[in-house]
Image: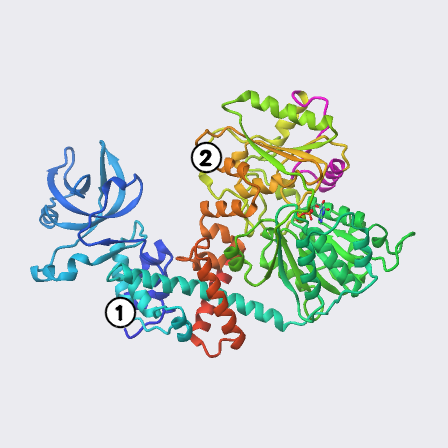
Amino acid sequence: MGRAILEDPLRLVIGDKAAKPLGRALDLHAVGDLLRHYPRRYETRGELTDLASLRDGEYVTVQAVIAKVTSRPMRNRRGSIFEATVTDGRGQLVLTFFSRGRQDWRERQLAPGLHGLFSGQVSTFRGKRQLAHPDYELLDVGDDAARAAAEYAAEMIPVYPAAKEITSWQIAAAVRIALDVLDIQDPMPRAIRERHGLCGLADALRGIHRPIDWADVRRSRDRLKWDEAFLLQTVLAQRRFAATAYSATPRPRMADGLLDAYDARLPFELTVGQELAGAQIGDEIALDHPMHRLLQGEVGSGKTVIAVRAMLQVVDGGGQAVLLAPTEVLAQQHFRSITDQLGPLAQAGELGAAEHATRVALLTGSLGAAARRRALLEAASGEAGIVIGTHALLEEKVQFADLGLVVIDEQHRFGVEQRDALRDKAGDGRPHLLVMTATPIPRTVAMTVFGDLEISTLTELPAGRAPIFTHVVPAAEKPHYLERVWERLREEAAQGRQSYVVCPRIGGDGPEGPDDDSAGDDRGPGDGGTDARGTDVSGTDFGGTGDGGLFAESARPSLAVLDLAGELERGPLAGLRLAVLHGRLPPDEKDATMRAFAQGSVDVLVTTTVVEVGVDVPNATAMVVMDADRFGVSQLHQLRGRVGRGRHEGLCLLVTEAEADGKSRQRLDAVAATLDGFKLSRLDLEQRREGDVLGAAQAGRRSSLKLLTLLTDEELIGRARREATELVAADPALARQPALAAAVRVLLDQERAEYLEKA
Ligand code: ADP
Ligand code: MG
């Protein structure tokens, strides 16, 4: 065949027979897929693999020297066993081949003294490491002249992530053919390449697959890493640019409106951070194109007030604002606290309402028919300036008279699609958008995941906030500590304060398997929830442990709300007012329980992670997390943010039976050691794969990041972002960069495909 481009199907280049296993086993279909399947490491010809490092069960490719061979007939059957023992100079590995007939040819081929690459699955048989029926390629066959060539000894051999059906060197052979016929347009403009000292794409692809030396590898990796960052940032810059092309109704701040009245009613001073973020947001919604902002801030840093103030500015400007919350519990809490804070400002049409007063409507899936009709009507007529709700808001029936601002709380629970669904409810033009997250995101992740948003960060907590003390309670080693835990909760109650006891599971007579806490919430289909293990499957979440293996560690099922509540009530907490809360309760019951807890008529709330995000009861001062090792680092941080929200210091007790020096205990110790959410989210990130971090909502990005690591490549990502932004500003449609435009299309197709697959 002639020349090939990256988008060409592999079979056209390497033939059907060779292409099939690549597609089946490694999901590589186009030339570009293969060329972006990078070597995992390189073997230097002549440098043997350390055989001691092999683990049972692994598929490996090792370089070794054949030490001796034996051949013998099988005992009870026809056929023979041929064994070759290979060595790295210290350890040994046995290669075993069975055959129906004699294997003289193999004996001639695998002669002692020869070097080879051997590939197969490691197992142990009678105390010896072996590869049964390995594939192999001998390295020093060929004539003496070739062997004498100087480079020969130094040549680097790429070792690819391989599979049972296809070996590392079969991949290498396919790559070689593809590289030979490749005709490539470099998508990165020359000027950018030159500014950052990057080599061309063709050169980099050759260099990463067939390097001459380590410098060659490094140069190539640098360039290819840049590609990943640059391409993604170009997509994001285009999105940001497209957003500015939309118009929005400006809602400048007005004197003597609801916002001023609200500010006058606020029982506290805003923090400096709140003032700054608030001013930034206030300025942006006064403009005639849509605001696009992410507000991130530590748990308890007071993001809601900022959102309410922005909403009131919009209402003052004649528009409506909608607040989307991820759970029923949170939506109801927002509704209650916002109506309380607004008082007469939210009582339009009622006796005693303030001048300019508006209404606040609540819309969740659990409303009765009449209440629902009323909420829909208030939203559609514009009577309600503020509409608060859950996924129920996304339904088509929900309409607004003049939607000016969309606020999304706890953004990591939502995907981009849901953001867009709400945004589409504005008539012509677009509403302003404010998304909030309490999951602190390292800067690079923010640039990558939320790269189409501008970012404001609240770093300080409101003054006078009492500290939270966290302790690990090793229940297995020191059972009497647990008694002390319950005693502490009694002490809190005696002082009129309240506590949470969090369990990983609901339990009771529910269906087997992990209880789904989101089951009772009205989430849309296809949207994940938080299962009882805290593994969030929707969007970016640093909450889950991201390590399924963790849960296998202990055979005992985790503690369950319904079981523990009964035990506590009969035993150590007898006489206190207990209540249970979990996702399987009917929504009105959940609401009633939260309300009772918020009003102080419940001493101890035994609950699942439904209280993880946003729940705000300042009088709650203690939290006990049972089986704390079953939660992720950032999730524990979120949970503990429920206490220490008022004047009294918070206490968080992480009860665990995990072993003293195990990994789980280390994670818990880390949580106990710091209150810095950013530090903890980095820790989470280090323990998880990048794809998990980017999350399902950012599908395409998962597979497009191969070399880039978000934790360590901050500088590079920042530079790529600046270049991409500048380029897109000058040439938004990439008309002058056809190769880059093509690469963007491929990335977006991939993202769409993965999104559809997920849905
Ligand atoms: P988060 O940022 O986690 O969503 P919230 O908005 O729920 O935090 O605020 C936490 C608590 O702090 C609320 O009770 C809120 O009323 C209170 N709060 C917010 N801002 C301030 C402030 N500047 N001073 C004192 N308390 C504040
Ligand atoms: Mg909040």
- Quarter where residue 642 is shown: top right
Q: Is residue 581 magenta?
A: yes
Instruction: Identify the residue at image location x=79%, y=54%.
Output: 263
Kindly identify the amino acid type of the residue bearing the numbered disc 2: Ala
Residue placed under numbered mark 1 in the picture? 180
The answer to whether any part of residue 531 appears in the image is: no
Residue 552: which disc?
2
Q: Is residue 379 magenta?
A: no
* Quadrant location, the C terminus: bottom right
Q: Which residues are magenta?
A: 571-598
In the visual, does 185 lie left or right of 489?
Answer: left
Could you tell me residue 40's position as x and y percent? 32, 53
The answer to whether any part of residue 527 appears in the image is: yes
Instruction: Identify the residue at image location x=30%, y=54%.
Output: 160
Could you tell me residue 73's position as x and y percent? 11, 37
Mark 2: secondary structure:
helix
